[in-house]
Image (cartoon, rainbow, N blue to C red):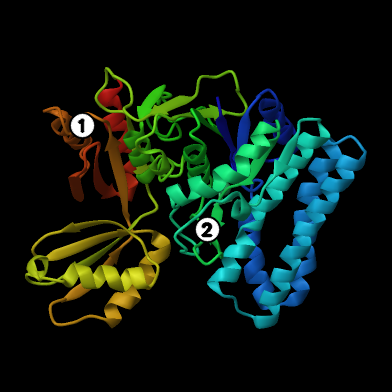
Amino acid sequence: MTRVMKFGGGCLRDSRSIAQACAIISAQRRAVVVVSAIHGVTERLLAAIEQAKRHERNIPPILAALATRHLAVIDELCPGGPAKKRLQVAIAAQLAQVERLLTGIAWHRDLTPAVRARLLSYGERLAARLLAGVLECLETRSAALDAHRAGICTDGNYENASIDRDRTRRVLRAKVAPLLRRGIIPVIPGFFGRGPGGAVTLLGRNGSDYSAAAVAYALGAERLEVWKDVDGFMSADPSRVPTARRLERLSFAEAAELSYFGARILHPRTVEPLAGTRTRIFVRNLEDPAGAGSEITASGPNRAVDVAGIAANRRLAVIRIHGAGIGSKPGLLAGVSSLLAGAGINIHSVLTSQTCINLLLDPADARRSLRKMKAAVNGVIKRIELEERLALVGVVGERIMEKEGIYARIFTAVAREKINVEMAAAGASSVACYFLVRSPDLDRAVRAIHDEFFP
Ligand code: ASP
Ligand code: MG
């Protein structure tokens, strides 16, 4: 049986947590490991890019901080000897490449998307070297691969790439299977892959879960274990709803929708490469390895409660495009979406009526979108406004569309709290409905629905 084990940045923080991950890995006979960058390292690389753009003299302290972070783990976990030395040299070699890239950026005071993607991939490259090296030092045979060479193949988009799962399968199997046969545990960096022309392409923030799923698909793994710093999926965010409970089981679609609407535990695309397979995904807590976690399967459980969970997202902006007859103007939506797509802006959702089109966006993209759209305004559009005080509630469950009365219960629960629903959509997914409320009402809305279904 092959299992793929993914360790997230949230649980690779320091030598203690890395030692814990290594203990879990070493107990396996046949495993492939996928890692994220050590906690906070991707953020640091992002900041490094900005600092390097400003001045070359900013680079040495950045490198020193990255080195300390990784070398301290080696010092604390590895007994002296040639394996330790080799690991220190490997980490230094990676850091030298980071330095070259940063120097290039400082020199140009500018950077291309290709260089940016390559630089940001070093968090995962360093983590994979580090983990494989520590395993070796602790006498578990292991080898770090490059995601490039390991064969994670993408469509070529630099920061929001999609994985080509079948090409990945062809290439990755050939690279990884021989290692497994020799009893070596491969460690693959997540978060990036190789585009058609060979460039480094990133899978979007927190994309390592998605990488791990592609690896699981490629190897026909029975299990994908996603190790995190939380117990598993919850019926709601426990910081909002103290009575939230762990979900023992959920379906691929439920996990995808909960993640899409704001549960930050798993990357929303994780289940995608596993569509049509029987791979089971387990979300486990590194701090409590004996805990049951959550199990995600294609069809999910037979659940007594109709709702699996409630997700909430405060980080949301809505752009409203007003105009008479705007909802029946052919091509208008196509124009808006291609305008934004051209600027690399993702539209989360669209709600239209005869007089208004509402676009749900990341707040980070909203102002830029507004500017682009105002510049392109034509006769039909009367007014465009940005609304930043709305928040989204997503209610997810395999049966919510199938069974009568569930919607009524959701909205009655919200109305009882005297909360106004600003916009709502249902039916876009057969397992989810979502609606918007004013941000200050968000927590109360989530609690009201939770109390209704999980009394
Ligand atoms: N390190 C990357 C990020 O922070 C990818 C990941 O964490 O999965 O977005
Ligand atoms: Mg991360």
In percent of width and height, residue 142 lies at 73, 37
Residue 369 percent coordinates (x, y): 34, 71
Residue 11 appears left or right of 171: right
The residue lying at 49 percent from left, 54 percent from top is 203
In the image, taking residue 450 as reference, residue 427 lies left or right, namely: left
Depicted 306 relative to depicted 132: above or below: above
Q: In the rendered view of the protein, which quadrant contains the C terminus? A: top left
Q: Secondary structure at mark 1?
A: loop
Q: Quadrant of residue 322?
A: bottom left
Are there few (<14), some (14-19), or many (20+) residues within 10 Å of tag 1? many
From the image, tell me which residue sits under label 1.
400
- C-alpha span from label 1 to label 2: 34 Å
Q: Indicate left or right for 215 with 249 as reference.
A: right
Question: Residue at point 58% right, 33% down?
Answer: 5
Quarter assignment of residue 2: top right
Residue on which disc 2 sits: 202
